[in-house]
């Protein structure tokens, strides 16, 4: 006798528990996700006699001196290959704020002429904006100046 | 009219109702002895809902940074933004808020900052300075100077990570 094979192979998945689990997951993740990512900007500060050792090595160094009115003096030290026009520059600020874009352009030009330039030092003024300071240092890192330090007042 | 005279027929494809039937709605026809009433029900398509939920869960899981350190920043404080920042690794935290200095959430006088940092050097050799972006550098300077004098190898500024480019 032939066995009956009429049993349907169709089956139904109950989606309601799946939806419940997903809804709980979404609620939990929405509550716990941190949307603002905080990182750190690392300074390369010389400790003890490190600064003197670097000075002896005569490595090209970029010095950025910020003034209270937003002007920035850009000096490249120990870079004889660089012409006078690029060795000393003054970047005017706008409305007492540092013109970050102009500084970025200038650093880019300097870096193109002195590729071995790898060290930068920012000398802020007392009234320099902390935001401007970080932006300037960020621009230096953007132009592959890996060691960026700050001079305390 | 007796109730058992009623008969419900699912998915009737009579020429009269075939136009009203769609892929997502089923037509149920209540046939009575005298009246033919069309009952329209529109079930929610749960499959697409589950798809949406799954996409949301995957997106949120990707957006969540599991295991990364977090820094408590008060709502009044706006950190400066920097593209070339590194992942936060907690160390000693000097917070500057309303001209007051806090070392690891403990309020401290600016004159005592050096001694306190020196004492906390054994915890970690890095110090993270957390300050509002609008403050002058003169407010940040005591923290930088004290950290360097205390002998911290790594001095870091807490920043908001922004996309490069």
Image (tube, coloured by chain):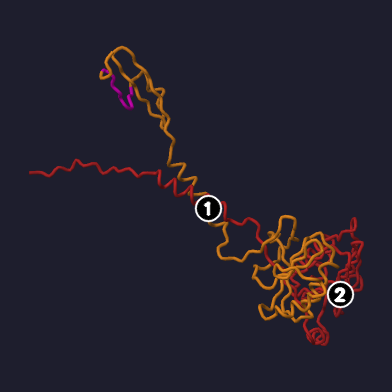
SS category of the residue bearing label 2:
strand
Q: In which chain is the residue bearing label 1?
A: A
Queried whether the magenta region covers residue B12, the answer comes back as yes
What residue sits 71% from the left and 55% below the top?
A: B75
Disc 1 and disc 2: Cα gap in Å?
A: 53 Å
* Magenta stretch contains residue A121: no
**Mark nearer the N terminus (1 vs 2):** 1
Residue A98: % across, % down: 86, 61
User: In the shown orientation, is residue A27 left or right of residue B34?
Assistant: right
**Residue at horizontal 58 percent and vertical 61 percent from the top:** B65
- For the point 46% across and 45% down, which residue is it? B51
Where does the image place residue A127, in percent across and percent down from the top left? 89, 64
Q: Could you confirm whether marks 1 and 2 are on the same chain? A: yes
User: Disc number at residue A28?
Assistant: 1
The answer to whether B50 appears left or right of B71 in the picture is left
Q: Quadrant of the C terminus of chain A?
A: bottom right
Residue A76 is marked as 2
Q: Which chain is orange?
A: B
**Rendered shade, chain A:** red
């Amino acid at each position: 006798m032939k066995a009956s094979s009429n049993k349907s192979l169709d089956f139904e998945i109950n989606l309601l528990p799946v939806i419940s689990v997903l809804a709980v997951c979404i609620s939990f993740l929405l509550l716990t996700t941190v949307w603002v990512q905080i990182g750190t900007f690392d300074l390369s500060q010389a400790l003890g006699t490190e600064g003197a050792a670097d000075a002896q090595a005569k490595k090209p160094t970029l010095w950025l001196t910020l003034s209270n009115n937003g002007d920035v003096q850009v000096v490249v030290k120990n870079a004889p290959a660089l012409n006078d026009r690029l060795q000393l520059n003054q970047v005017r600020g706008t409305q007492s704020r540092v013109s970050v874009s102009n500084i970025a352009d200038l650093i880019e030009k300097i870096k193109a002429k002195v590729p071995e330039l790898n060290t930068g030092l920012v000398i802020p003024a007392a009234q320099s904006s902390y935001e401007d300071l970080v932006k300037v240092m960020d621009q230096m890192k953007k132009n592959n100046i890996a060691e960026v330090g700050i001079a305390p007042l | 009219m007796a109730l058992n005279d009623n008969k419900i027929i699912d998915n009737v494809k009579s020429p009269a109702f075939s136009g009203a039937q769609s892929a997502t709605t089923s037509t149920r026809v209540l046939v009575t002895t005298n009246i033919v009433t069309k009952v329209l029900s529109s079930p929610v398509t749960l499959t697409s809902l589950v798809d949406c939920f799954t996409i949301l869960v995957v997106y949120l899981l990707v957006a969540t940074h599991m295991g990364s350190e977090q820094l408590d920043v008060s709502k009044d404080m706006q950190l400066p933004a920097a593209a070339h920042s590194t992942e936060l690794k907690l160390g000693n935290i000097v917070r500057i808020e309303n001209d007051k200095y806090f070392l690891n959430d403990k309020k401290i006088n600016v004159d005592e900052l050096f001694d306190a940092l020196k004492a906390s050097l054994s915890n970690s050799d890095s110090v993270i300075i957390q300050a509002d972006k609008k403050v002058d550098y003169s407010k940040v300077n005591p923290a930088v100077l004290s950290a360097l004098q205390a002998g911290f190898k790594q001095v870091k500024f807490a920043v908001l990570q922004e996309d490069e480019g």
